[in-house]
Amino acid sequence: LYLAMANADPSIVTKNHPQRVVEDGETYDILVIDDGWSPSVDLYIHSATGHISKLVTLENDHLFRDIPLVVTYHNWTNEELGSGLLSFPMDIVLTGRGELWYEEHRTKVTQNPTFTNEFDFPPEASPIYEADQYSWGWFTSQFVQMWCTFGVSKNEQQLDVVPIELTDGVYFIRGSMYNSMVIDQGESVVVVEAPLYPERSEAIMAWIDVTLKKPITHLIVTHHHFDHSGGARAYVAAGVPIMVAEAGVSLLQEVAQAPSTVVPDAQEKVHADPIFIPIELNDLGIIENGAGVVHKETLVPTGDLEVGRRNVVYALRFATSHANDQILIKVASCSDGPTILFQSDMFNPDDQNGRPLNPIWAIEFRDDITKFGLNRPNTILCGGHASYAPLSQLYEYVDKQIPFYIKAYVFFQAHKRTAQVATIILLLLIILIFFLRMRG
């Protein structure tokens, strides 16, 4: 594609300086393709063979922003093509941020193949060109390709904001695949979860500005995974403090300070210093009337402490096999409304039959809910995915649909030392019984 662009418009091709470089004992000419719109592309041309050995460019990553994208081409051959006029690389390696993302080995190359109509759009499809979506996909192609490998077709920008008021002032913000929560505390607002990318966060912030017309005092991030924290930069740029597990602070610090020239966002323009409120394991963060504090080694307060307090937000830090920096959010209303819990990835509640991404996570989460005394009547469980449902849906799923052997595995993982001692005692008993039988 890049070569086709260069052939169509040779003016976008320039030689870099220095014109030649030596890497690993090999000499390369560097050609730079720069169309003035997308990030420039450096092509490393092997001086002896004329083959392209490497492509280097930048791409936008929604979490880390500008990242180096490097494609290397190996084992060029023309044996499969017969004529000998055209060579083709049989091995290709793609890396992003220095990490291996993709390898491909070609075993056969067919020149000018004939394609059947299986590549046509189905009759009922009516694809249309959208300039914004084209631009978004062009600058973030690896993100789009990643979701395709997962079999997820909804990889367009997810900017839809569908608010559902669960109780007075507590809004569940539904998206196509990712959800957030907005809590109105009277004079100010708290936001839970900043998924995907800054553009989604900006859509939620715009809804708050138009509908609630109140300042955002805090953002709470449930865990560090990119699809749940990729929008945090928008809040950093707006000067909003972020309550997050201490294990996720260094990552979000890196994210907040990353350059974003490929797709400039608000943070690239203002370079705001991030403000973090870290929560350590078993700590409790409390946000009330716009003020956030952290209580060390504190369990969730009982209902008696919540009387008369409007939509107090509790952020409880706990660890799971999914993420060691997980945070569970509890919202206690001063009204007779339900208690609201929000979590991501541990369980996906919905209006029919909720289910987890992994049954082990659901068991761990159920155990933590029980340990912290949150399994109370009139409690709604919200998910960063799917929807919301009564908390009882989680307990029913774990009790009735998860096989016993998975529950046993989770139990022994949670009680490793006890299990090890029990195993040793059992082995000693077996040896003792064997010894007594031998003597008898």
Image: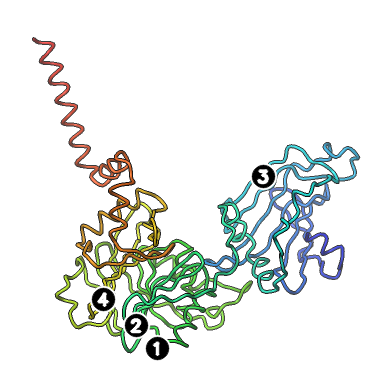
Q: Position of residue 127 (x, y in %)?
A: 71, 65
Query: Which residue corresponds to the image point at 29% horizontal and 40% vertical from the top-left?
Result: 404
Question: Which quadrant is the N terminus positioned in?
Answer: bottom right
In percent of width and height, residue 20 lies at 78, 59
- The amino acid marked with disc number 1 is Lys
The answer for how far apart the CA atoms under marks 4 and 2 are is 14 Å
The mark lying in front, picked from 1 and 3, is: 1
Instruction: Name which quarter of the figure residue 289 lies in.
Output: bottom left
- Whether residue 322 is situated above or below residue 311 in the rendered picture: above
Is residue 411 toward the left or the right of residue 304 in the image? right
Which numbered marker is on residue 214?
A: 1
Q: Which mark is on residue 104?
A: 3
Q: Which residue is mark 4?
A: 337
Q: Residues within 10 Å of mark 2 (few under 14, many from 20)?
A: many
| Residues at marks 1 and 2 touching, judged by CB atoms closer than 8 Å | yes
Q: Amino acid at mark 4?
A: Gly
- Distance, label 4 to label 3, CA atoms, is 56 Å
Q: Which residue is denoted by mark 2 in the rendering? A: 184
Name the residue located 60 percent from the left edge and 55 percent from the top edge: 148
Q: Which dot, 4 or 2, sits closer to the camera?
A: 4
Q: Quadrant of residue 394?
A: bottom left
The answer to which of marks 4 and 3 sits earlier in the sequence is: 3
CB atoms of marks 4 and 2 within 8 Å: no
